[in-house]
Amino acid sequence: MLGLVAAFAVAAVVLGVVLGWRARRASWGFQIARAERVRALPSVRRVVARRLVVLAGVLALTAVALGAAAVVAARPMRESVVEPESHSRDIMLCLDVSGSMSDVDVEVLELFAELADDFQGERVGLTIFNSSPVRIFPLTDDYAFVRDNLERVRTSFDYVDEVPEHWVGTLNGNGGSLVGDGLAACALGFDHPDDDRARSIILATDNEVNGAETITVDKAAGYAGSLGVRVFAIDPADEQTAEAAALREAVEGTGGTSFALRGATTVDQIVAQVQAEDATLLKGEPRIVRVDDPGPWPVIVAVTALALVIVLWAVRDRGRRERMLWVGRIALVLACGVLLLRPTVPGGSSPTLASELDVVLVVDATASIVAEDWDGDLPRLDGVRGDVEELVRRYPGARFALITFGAEAEVRVPLTSDTTALTSSLSVLRPEPTAQSRGSSVGVAADTLRETLESAEAVSPDRARMVFYLGDGEQTAFSPRESFADSADLVSGGAVLGYGTAEGGPMRSTSAGVDGPGDYIEYQGERALSKIDPATLQEIADELGVDYQERSAGSALEVPEPPTDVVAEDGEIENVIELSWLVAFVIAALLLVELARGVQLATRTGRVHTRAPRGEAAR
């Protein structure tokens, strides 16, 4: 755009010079003999010099205003991070994968997929359970991500020998089909519990409990109801049973109801019931947006153009042609006023940009992560959550994955651009139950990390990958710590972030139920203390090839710059349509006229006709 305006400006200058040299008697005045004598008069020389200075000022102001208008017309853009707001509801899909449900789970998952297709803007999560619950994916409105994971779970029912990866962890309890524990885990899957939101659980189970539940189904339903969560049950039984009746009574106490799996209108009824509740305002994932940003250039255009008009008024002529020029100058003043108002119209959109960057978070979920030595006596997990939120802000447009580890490592959130799913998963993260803790290794996630990075590289080899390890480094397993060195060649950057103090912090016991933190854990009659191990954390950092940073509540998080820039559009969000650049086009056109006129006058002023009248030339 600047080159185009420059070309038009050169054309205007050439036109002005040509018009100046082709001046005729009718337009310039009378020709006189011995003009050099007149031009030599001091008064004439002063007038001519004064006029040339004024015209030079006119040309300078015109050039500055024209250049600034060209910049605005070129639509300068800037990238900003926004958090789109939307009105939504939260829905947790809760699936019993015990043996008694194996014949109908595929049908249930197909029904879940139909529900996901019918929802509009709702956040959806999935938890499966047998004797213990496992969250497959947290609340997200990335429906492609939801469909992919539902299909992945559906196809896993075809396994023969090896238990599918995401089923690992569903058999850690005593017995099977512990519906109360599964329902309680689903109720705990909603983030921001203090916010007043529309929340629903869609529970698919036959309620055939086989073992000792930590919490019964009626108490779990009561707990869900106390959180404002409505529970809708999907009953696979073709006939009425005592278990089905008990389940119906429990969910009706939450304001929900029970539906038959094979009912002709089941999907429509569930969707209608869920959407009957008012949606609530949610902030979406941070996105990089490219928007018009003319900066100070409209002001520069307006100031210089108005100064130009004032100067032209001061040296105005009285001719008819000059009056025509003043029509354009009035239009120039009005256009400058419109430009300063930054005119916009609704109904537009701005492109959102994606970063070619994958960020994998490895988070300690052992009992020590809730040791109370963060910012005084707060759990370390509070610091972890705050730093993850900061990482999301620092790397907008990136895809994030979350791996947590206790006795085993688990991919809680596969790579996704929906960062609300990540923060949702972390907000409901709880350490492994104290009763199940048998000591843990701070390197147990090494293989899972390498597999995640290798999978990401296979799918998108050109993307950069960063790894952030967040933990206290406390090794409580007797086995040697696993090494992260095998992942180093797949890592483009990141950091190891350490939490805890050398003095240590006390830990409370945790359970798999809905109760809050328990009593402090004691060892030999005193409170057991968890201490940070910076040496081990530094070793992990060296193995990954990243820096180590010990965190505290009063220190700023220092993270490396992303190894890649924003490179592509991946969608759009609603925005206004900026019209300043169109107004700048009009201003530029009017200024080109003034530029040509100013050059014409400057050329005429610098030239005096010396051709003598015919009669005097013959003497």
Image (cartoon, rainbow, N blue to C red):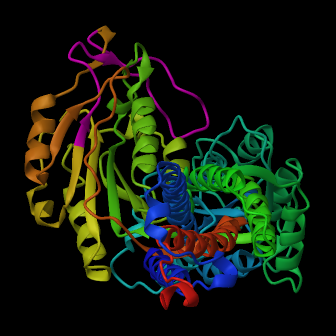
Choose top left, top right, bottom left or bottom right for residue 410.
Answer: bottom left
Left or right: 119 as drawn, with respect to 135 = right
- Nearer to me, 397 or 410: 397
Q: Residue at x 8, y 57 (%)?
A: 485
**Depicted 299 relative to depicted 437: above or below:** below
Q: Residue at x 82, y 51 (%)?
A: 250
- Nearer to me, 51 or 248: 51
Residue 426 percent across, percent down from the top left: 48, 45
Residue 85 percent across, percent down from the top left: 70, 54
Choose top left, top right, bottom left or bottom right for residue 539.
Answer: top left
540 part of magenta stretch: no
Tell me the magenta residue range: 496-524
- Nearer to me, 285 or 295: 295
Q: Main secondary structure of the magenta part?
A: loop
- Nearer to me, 361 or 54: 54
Instruction: Tell me if I can see residue 609 in this picture.
Output: yes
Residue 262 percent across, percent down from the top left: 80, 84
Q: Residue at x 79, y 64 (%)?
A: 318
521 part of magenta stretch: yes
So how many labels did they put on this image?
A: 0
Instruction: Tell me if I can see residue 149 in this picture.
Output: no
Choose top left, top right, bottom left or bottom right for residue 365.
Answer: top left
Residue 158 percent across, percent down from the top left: 46, 87
Q: Residue at x 49, y 75 (%)?
A: 569
Residue sitting farthest toward the top: 525
Left or right: 447 as drawn, with respect to 371 = left
Left or right: 508 as drawn, with respect to 96 = left
